[in-house]
Amino acid sequence: MIRAFLAVLVAVVAVVAGGCNYFNQSPAVLWYRASTSATALHSLFTLPQEHVDSFLKSYEIFEKEAYDSPEDAKNIVNYYQVINHLCAVGDLEKMYIPPVTDLNNGIFANQMEWEEKGMADKLDVGPGKKVLEVGCGRGRIAHHVASYTGAEVTGINIDPSQIAMAKNYAEAEGILGKTLNFKLANYNDPLPFANETFDALYHVQALTYAQDLKALFTEMNRVLKPGAKISFLDWFKLDKYNPEDKHHQHLLKEVKAVIGAVKTPSAEEYHTALRETGFEVLFSGEASIDGGHQWPLVQKADLFYTTFKSIVDTLTTFHIIPAHLKVLLERLVEGGQSFVEADKLGLFTTSYQIIAQKPAVKR
Ligand SMILES: *[C@@H]1O[C@H](CO)[C@@H](O)[C@H](O)[C@H]1NC(C)=O
């Protein structure tokens, strides 16, 4: 009964939000999206108060520019164990705004297209190959890469609740332990794999919590076979960002809280660390079409969540749904327009891709 009510709520939100291209998808995708939304809403309704409190407190980490204490790791888990449900209600289950591949499509379709053509195709993997995803969240990107390429994908993540969800879904689909594996691990610790295990590696907007880039890349290099390729999709500051400009500083602070970023590095920092740890950089640049502006997709997400929020505001006024949902959504939609503005100004990007390779022969 409650599921049916939630599904209707999601459908209403989707219709009202209109421009989100929710219905312009195949029935299978539509069913997957609707059931994911309903499950996420159910998790949000039944969220323990302590998770709500620790989520709100976790935002202190986005005031920082360095990830460096055990307290930070706790905040990250507290943030993700709630935000993943908020994101999954809408088109953001995979928790990233994808590079733009086609503006006639919604966020979900752009993610699918980019994960195939923009990322998986460039890793040169297929059946019998092993791929590592660092910071896999609920495991849906890994699931897609495994089914698309036929390779065996292993995802690691710091949040036990998301690893459990990733495993459950893979199990239900019958591929857990076959082409899909998940492991609870913090990428700031030594990676829990033997030398030269993987044929490729990728991450999607996950490295903002890296404590020591060189240590992390050294570990990545160690677990990769010679010749293995890596793809990073990252949040970087761009040349137009002026650290002295007060408005730029304000936008940075707001966007970091929306996307859950701590460090805002430049692409050069990554190039240097990659080269120093034995990688060769093959490509470095914007992954979005037409010069890299993602704001039309951000706008779609913002429209969905602000619409959803106004429905929730109304329902909480009549005590139809728990009040904490309103508080959570207030936090989520804060800064959405700053994200759009910063992207239009070209100050930062969340769609910068680096492709690198561990040389085939030791040098
Ligand atoms: C694994 O690689 C590291 C450095 O890349 C090396 O120091 C270590 O001895 C290797 N371990 C094994 C078991 O070969």
Image (tube, grey):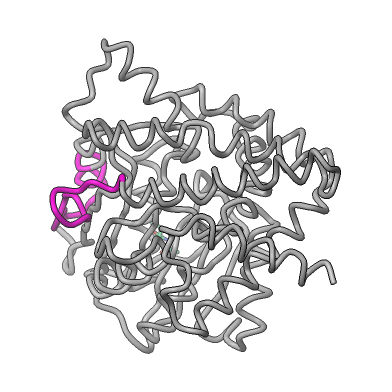
Seen at 42% across and 39% down, the residue is 208
In the rendered image, residue 313, in percent from the top left (x then y), is placed at: 70, 40
In the rendered image, residue 340, in percent from the top left (x then y), is placed at: 34, 37
Residue 85 sits in quarter:
bottom right
In the rendered image, residue 100, in percent from the top left (x then y), is placed at: 27, 58
Query: 236 left or right of 309?
Result: left
Observer-nearest residue: 204 or 202? 204
Query: 253 left or right of 172?
Result: left
Seen at 41% across and 58% down, the residue is 19
In the rendered view, tell whether residue 207 sits above or below residue 145.
above
Observer-nearest residue: 134 or 224? 134
Q: Which residues are magenta?
A: 271-295
Observer-nearest residue: 263 or 1? 1
Query: 325 left or right of 14?
Result: right
Q: Quadrant of ligand 1?
A: bottom left
Q: Is residue 252 visible?
A: yes
Q: Is residue 293 magenta?
A: yes
Seen at 61% across and 66% down, the residue is 11
Q: Is residue 84 magenta?
A: no
In the rendered view, tell whether residue 26 sits above or below residue 50.
below
In the rendered view, tell whether residue 284 sits above or below residue 26.
above
Q: Quadrant of the C terminus?
A: bottom left
